[in-house]
Image: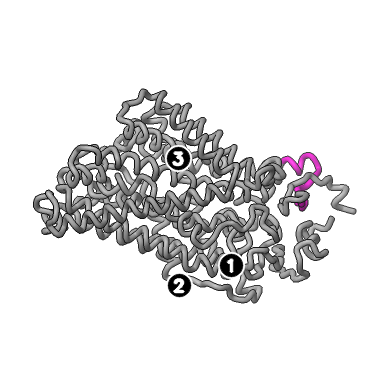
Amino acid sequence: MSESRSKEAQAFVSGDAGSNDVKLDGSLEFVHEYGGNDSKPSYQEASGAPVENVSPLGLQVTWFTTIFLNIGQMIGTGVFSTPATILKGVGSVGLSLLFWALGLVIAGSQLAVYTELASYFPNRSGAEVVYLEQAYPRPKYLLPTAFAVQSVLLSFSSSNAIVMAQYLYATAGHTPTPWEQKGLAVACITFIILLVIFSTKISLRISNTVGIIKVITLTFISITGLVVLGGHSSVKHPHANFQDSFSGTTGNGYGLANALVKINFAYAGYTNAFNVVNEVKNPIRTLKRTAPASLLVVATLYLLCNIAYFAAVPKASLKTSKQLAASLFFSAVFGSGKAPRALNFLISLSAFGNIISVIIGSSRVIRECGRQGVLPYPRVWASTRPFGTPLAPYILKWGLTVLMILAPPAGDAFNFIVDLQSYPSNVFFFATTFGLLLIRRRRSRLNIPATEFRTWNAAIIFSLAINIFILAMPWYPPPGGRFGGDVSFWYATYCVVGLAILVICGIYYAFWIYILPKFKGYRIRQELLVLDDENAKVHRLVKVPLAELEL
């Protein structure tokens, strides 16, 4: 076996990948690949997961579905509660509304980055997995290994399942014990996992339907808010919060920074459809239209809902009440009868739709990690048997989510784990954005033709600046000092643990790829596997003795 040409490139040249076009950039080999989703051909570095020329998961994601995969993840339960948190952080109604508008600009910039990256690899699902793999191909398998570990270890949706259970009980008018709530949360996630396992088509249709209901709900709140502003309700002084709207603006840096992070989180999900790119016909042409459309719809509804809340509920009540902003709004406009119970049902339904959208997207991420070969048993992760769905990623999601529902007690442990999910993800998000510049430079050196989309440099720079801010902000001490966070111990512990996980991944990688092979006399090489009758392709990393390499 030659050291200068990897096995996947040899397979490509022999006809397996469908073309003889290989471009070399030092030790990097870029192969010309074709997808079966009517996308344009792409160049990708050969050490990455192989392109599946025919998607084993089918082409069931329509343009309509791409809109609601994004909307389904963006609109969860945050829009019903986050506005009050944002107001507390910034201090004034005027600045709060400006922050929501700024959130659209931030999300739009980062969406443009993802669209350009997707245009380079329109025949690969998994989004971030692919972009990191291709932006940082050397050291070989380092970024894929770290991202795979993070994706597997922190792949759970326990908080959303618990929220869904909580509001289902509230709809029924029952106050559950902690174990009753945990039990219903497990039942909720189990039902959803079974749903997505047995049929991608049905789960996508349910995602679309729930997404439509979410949009209708927020539209109803928005229109009701405009009616209140027009003076056609029982609410007194609907314009009070908008008079001298910047009064009370805080100068607290932690509050402003935390509010911006909350805003960014509220918009998270606008890239979910990029996780299923290989299941979309003409993906870039589709996503160039539907991804911005979904973001604009959500941003407009977010702004109008905030205006509705501020029209009906006094600012002081929003800041001090422990109830949801939406709950205060419904009570102010419709009274305290059946309206709060209806809202509880809508929140639980929103959580349900959010979980479906998240699980569909993240299952493709995990499957792509498995296809890279850095996870054990790559065949298992890539297989779509017996239902034409990624069974192993779904089972993993279910197992970890149930564990995180049952194991951690409420309070510090639960809050810490939820926070821990976010920090490594933000590190990879920054790496993905910066990786776009690396891919651009590499493609320019190789004279690879331009793709269907190119974002402005200003959007990349702005996105990088926001990423740095989000990474730096959690280290800034809260007003209560080192123990003033949402846990009783040091507020930035989750940041340290998140970075420690990445460092451990690096140590594990060095031991697995370099140290152990050196002492045992072998090298790690790739082997292309094609799963019979599934159209699935996967790389398996195998140990090749040095004696065989010299032949």
Between marks 1 and 2 in the image, the one whose residue lies nearer the viewer: 1
The span picked out in magenta is: 516-530
Type of amino acid under label 2? Trp
Residue 270 pos. (x, y %) = 44, 57
**Residue situated furthest right in the rendering:** 551
Residue 340 pos. (x, y %) = 26, 39
Type of amino acid under label 1? Asn
**Mark 2 to mark 3 CA distance (whole Å):** 32 Å
Image-quadrant location for residue 151: top right
Residue carrying label 2? 456
User: Neighbour class for label 2 at 10 Å: few (<14), some, many (≥20)?
Assistant: few
The secondary structure type at the circle numbered 1 is loop
Residue 550 pos. (x, y %) = 87, 53
179 to 526, vertically: above or below? above
The numbered dot on residue 69 is: none
Image-quadrant location for residue 239: bottom left
Residue carrying label 1? 282
Residue in view at x 69 percent, y 44 percent: 385
Task: State left or right for residue 225 relative to residue 506.
Answer: left
The numbered dot on residue 420 is: 3
The secondary structure type at the circle numbered 2 is loop
Residue in view at x 21 percent, y 37 percent: 337
Q: How is the image coloured?
A: one colour
User: Neighbour class for label 1 at 10 Å: few (<14), some, many (≥20)?
Assistant: some
Q: Is residue 529 visible?
A: no
Which circle's residue, 1 or 2, is located before the other in the chain?
Answer: 1
